[in-house]
Image (cartoon, rainbow, N blue to C red):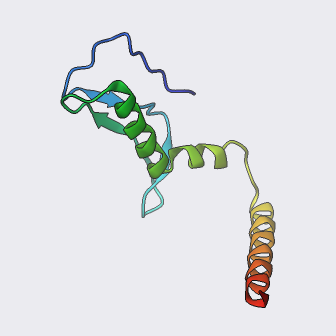
């Protein structure tokens, strides 16, 4: 499930640097769509900068958080319980901030 990067190949400007495409996300209608993060090599850009831009794009797209969230099945009742705990923590934190 990990993306494989091979830097032994020569990357040319304009060539796409593609990430692992096996992740699915939901669109506005609730349908699953395949998302693929990709970046193009800019002229005079180092491979480190290219990889940094790729990682940033993957983080922004939410692919990894989706994978972590869907790693295990969580029932609806369990999800409601978790959300309730989060809201209680959020309310208590806000109350503490108001007290200070």
The residue nearer to you, when weighing 1 against 39, is: 39
Q: Residue furthest bottom?
A: 99
Q: In this rendering, would 85 be left or right of 48?
A: right
Residue 58 seen in the current view = yes
x, y percentage for residue 40? 26, 34
The residue under the point 81% across, 68% down is: 81
x, y percentage for residue 27? 43, 58
The residue under the point 44% across, 20% down is: 5
The residue nearer to you, when weighing 86 against 73, is: 86
Residue 17 quadrant:
top left
x, y percentage for residue 89? 79, 74
Q: In this rendering, would 12 be left or right of 50?
A: left
Residue 34 seen in the current view = no
The residue nearer to you, when weighing 89 against 70, is: 89
The residue nearer to you, when weighing 53 against 26, is: 53
Q: In this rendering, would 4 be left or right of 98?
A: left
Taking 2 as reference, is 57 above or below it? below
Residue 76 quadrant:
bottom right
Quarter the N terminus occupies: top right
Quarter the C terminus occupies: bottom right
Q: In this rendering, would 92 be left or right of 34?
A: right
């Amino acid at each position: 499930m990990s993306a494989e990067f091979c830097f032994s190949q020569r990357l040319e400007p304009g060539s796409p640097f593609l990430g692992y495409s096996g992740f699915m996300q939901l669109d506005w209608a609730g349908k699953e769509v395949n998302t693929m993060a990709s970046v193009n090599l800019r002229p005079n850009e180092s491979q480190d900068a290219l990889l940094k831009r790729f990682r940033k794009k993957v983080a922004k797209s939410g692919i990894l958080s989706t994978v972590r969230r869907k790693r295990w099945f969580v029932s609806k009742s369990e999800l409601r319980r978790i959300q309730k705990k989060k809201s209680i923590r959020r309310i208590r934190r806000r109350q503490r901030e108001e007290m200070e």
